[in-house]
């Protein structure tokens, strides 16, 4: 594909389309599917009054109307059925790393583009934030089908060259999102666990549903290096010339402990955590996750 549309893979979209929409709607569904409300009972607007009948919830009685007319009237509400989703894509320098054809940033961009396309197809409002130590680009939420072009344009312009720092950033973003919805984080999560989780907890405090996709390169995950290797530092770290086999066991333990600490902390906050390698076909990984989510 040419230009920004390279992030929309027909193979990935076809795999997603084969999933039953109703299955993906379960509980606080990943998408709004048939446009039943994914968040029942919130984000409602007053529509009209009707006369009280036995069995109605007395919490919906309009006491102001009763005081004026001596009649019990029930407030009726029109429930908002559309999901609002904010996607946070890490564009820090470590996301530039690749051991094969696809960098973590490119893989994450395909993931964001695919889910944005899916959500907009469902007429769900979707927005994008590109971040490192600050907000670099912000595409406000919209449900217009043409909004995908604005998202793809920003993904196409994304450059990974700065440090990551979420200690303040996620709190800033949480305060900007006014309506309860869904927050999707796409990042390699190469940052300290405590400030990361404080930021994610802020989203949960605001009653957002949160899903975290950790994007890792297979060389980061498996550390297959054998010969003396010069490791080039990213995000301010220096170069290191070393014999990798002497480091492998300690490195893998640290890598797995870090991911497991995030996984456990996310589980405590009822946050979905999904680790994906850039060597894994997205058309396989994403439907598998959505199907697992539906079964829950």
Image: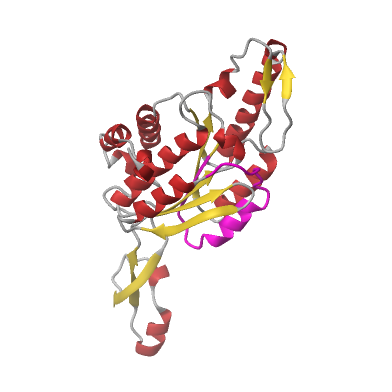
Q: Looking at the rendering, which quadrant does residue 176 occupy? A: bottom right
Q: Residue at x 35, y 30 (%)?
A: 283
Q: Looking at the rendering, which quadrant does residue 113 occupy? A: top left
Stretch in magenta: 159-186
From what the image shows, is residue 24 above or below residue 139?
A: above
Q: In this view of the protein, which residue sits in the foreground, 15 or 274?
A: 15
Q: Do we see residue 26 in this rendering? A: no
Position of 10 with respect to 85 (left or right) is left
Q: In the rendered structure, does residue 171 fall within the stretch colored magenta?
A: yes
Q: Quadrant of the N terminus?
A: top left
Position of 133 with respect to 215 (left or right) is right
Q: In the rendered structure, does residue 37 fall within the stretch colored magenta?
A: no
Q: In this view of the protein, which residue sits in the foreground, 283 or 65?
A: 283
From what the image shows, is residue 263 above or below residue 145?
A: above
Q: Quadrant of the C terminus?
A: top left
Q: Residue at x 64, y 31 (%)?
A: 261
Image coordinates of residue 294 in percent, x first then y, are 36, 36
Q: Residue at x 42, y 80 (%)?
A: 63
Q: Do we see residue 130 in this rendering? A: yes
- In the picture as drawn, the residue positioned furthest to the bottom comes out as 68
Image coordinates of residue 223 in percent, x first then y, are 60, 17
Q: Looking at the rendering, which quadrant does residue 6 occupy? A: top left
């Amino acid at each position: 594909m040419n230009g920004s549309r390279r992030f929309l893979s027909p193979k990935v979209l076809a795999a997603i389309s084969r999933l039953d929409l109703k299955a993906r709607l379960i509980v606080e569904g990943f998408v709004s599917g048939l446009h039943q409300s994914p968040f029942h009972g919130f984000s409602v607007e007053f529509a009209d009054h009707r006369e009280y009948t036995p069995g109605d919830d007395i919490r919906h009685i309009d006491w102001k109307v009763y005081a004026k007319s001596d009649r019990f009237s029930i407030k009726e509400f029109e429930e908002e059925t559309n999901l609002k989703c904010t996607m946070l894509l890490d564009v820090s320098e470590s996301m530039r790393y690749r051991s094969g054809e696809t960098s973590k940033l490119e893989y994450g961009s395909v993931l964001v583009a695919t889910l944005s396309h899916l959500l907009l197809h469902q007429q769900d409002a979707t927005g994008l934030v590109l971040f490192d130590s600050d907000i670099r680009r912000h595409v406000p939420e919209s449900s217009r089908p043409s909004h995908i072009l604005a998202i793809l344009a920003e993904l196409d312009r994304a450059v990974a060259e700065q440090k990551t720092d979420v200690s303040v950033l996620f709190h800033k973003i949480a305060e900007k999102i006014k309506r309860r919805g869904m927050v999707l984080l796409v990042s390699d999560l190469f940052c300290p666990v405590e400030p990361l989780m404080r930021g994610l907890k802020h989203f949960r405090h605001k009653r957002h549903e949160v899903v975290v996709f950790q994007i890792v390169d297979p060389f980061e995950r498996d550390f297959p290096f054998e010969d003396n290797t010069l490791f080039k530092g990213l995000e301010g770290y220096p170069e290191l010339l070393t014999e990798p086999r002497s480091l492998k066991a300690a490195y893998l333990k640290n890598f797995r402990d870090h991911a497991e600490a995030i996984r456990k902390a996310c589980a405590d906050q009822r946050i979905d955590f999904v680790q994906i390698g850039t060597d894994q076909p997205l058309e396989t990984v994403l439907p598998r996750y959505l199907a697992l989510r539906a079964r829950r």
